[in-house]
């Protein structure tokens, strides 16, 4: 895990230092290099995301960890798009999603989250903020089963609320 984080941080530093050569069009070139792929989405991102949005995202994880789903709901927009690591997909009103998440959280007696790193990205193309987080989560079910995994989640924000969520899981 430490090797993964170190590699990510070094890569982020290199990308940040070379931002003047950044490919802003997604045309398959970066400076004088011809890249083997063209980006389907714009590669023009900045880290111009407010600390208050970072706080909102990190609080959403703390609320999940402590089981405070009413507070979690306050971090979410009126509608959500969700793509979970277990294959669950959702697109619709957040209140409907909360029923599913409440049932899921109610099956757990304990959740422990250890945040490793986060990254703030602002998409210049569509003016949407994304906050990606890497963390370890240990879930203890009411049945006694314990499950732990590393996660990488992407949180999309609009108007100061999370409205898009995608999760990726690596079992330990």
Image (cartoon, helix red, strand yellow):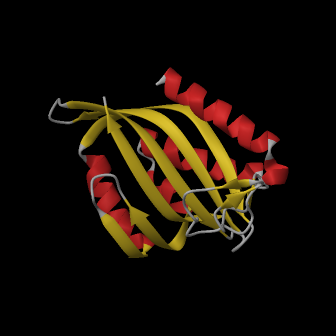
Question: Where in the figure is residue 101, as x and y percent of width and height?
Answer: 34, 57
For image coordinates 35% across by 70% down, the residue present is 90
* Residue furthest top as drawn: 2
Q: Is residue 27 above or below residue 114?
A: below
- Residue 116 lies left or right of residue 55; in this view the side is left
- Residue nearest the observer in this picture, 9 or 78: 9
For image coordinates 62% across by 52% down, the residue present is 131
- Residue nearest the observer in this picture, 124 or 69: 124
* Residue furthest right as drawn: 20
Quadrant of the drawing holding the C terminus: top left
Question: Where in the figure is residue 80, as x and y percent of width and height?
Answer: 47, 71
- Residue nearest the observer in this picture, 92 or 37: 37
Q: Is residue 73 above or below residue 127?
A: above
Q: Quadrant of residue 81?
A: bottom left
Q: Is residue 156 visible?
A: yes
- Residue 10 lies left or right of residue 145; in this view the side is right
Q: Is residue 53 above or below residue 137?
A: below
Q: Is residue 96 visible?
A: no
Question: Where in the figure is residue 40, as x and y percent of width and height?
Answer: 55, 69
For image coordinates 55% across by 43% down, the residue present is 133
Question: Where in the figure is residue 165, as x and y percent of width and height?
Answer: 48, 60
- Residue nearest the observer in this picture, 69 or 157: 157
For image coordinates 29% across by 62% down, the residue present is 88
Q: Quadrant of residue 31?
A: bottom right
Q: Quadrant of residue 110?
A: top left
- Residue 76 lies left or right of residue 103; in this view the side is right
């Amino acid at each position: 895990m430490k090797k993964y984080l170190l590699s990510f941080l070094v890569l982020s530093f290199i990308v940040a230092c070379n931002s003047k050569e950044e490919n802003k069009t997604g045309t398959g070139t970066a400076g004088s290099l011809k890249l083997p792929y063209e980006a389907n989405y714009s590669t023009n991102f900045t880290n111009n995301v407010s600390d208050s949005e970072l706080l909102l995202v990190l609080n959403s994880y703390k609320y999940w960890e402590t089981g405070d789903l009413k507070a979690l709901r306050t971090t979410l927009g009126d509608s959500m798009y969700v793509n979970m690591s277990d294959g669950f997909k959702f697109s619709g009103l957040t209140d409907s999603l909360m029923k599913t998440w409440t049932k899921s959280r109610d099956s757990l007696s304990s959740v422990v989250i250890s945040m490793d790193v986060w990254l703030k990205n602002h998409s210049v193309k569509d003016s949407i903020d994304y906050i990606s987080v890497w963390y370890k989560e240990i879930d203890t079910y009411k049945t006694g089963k314990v499950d732990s995994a590393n996660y990488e989640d992407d949180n999309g924000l609009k108007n100061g609320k999370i409205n898009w969520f995608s999760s990726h899981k690596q079992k330990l």
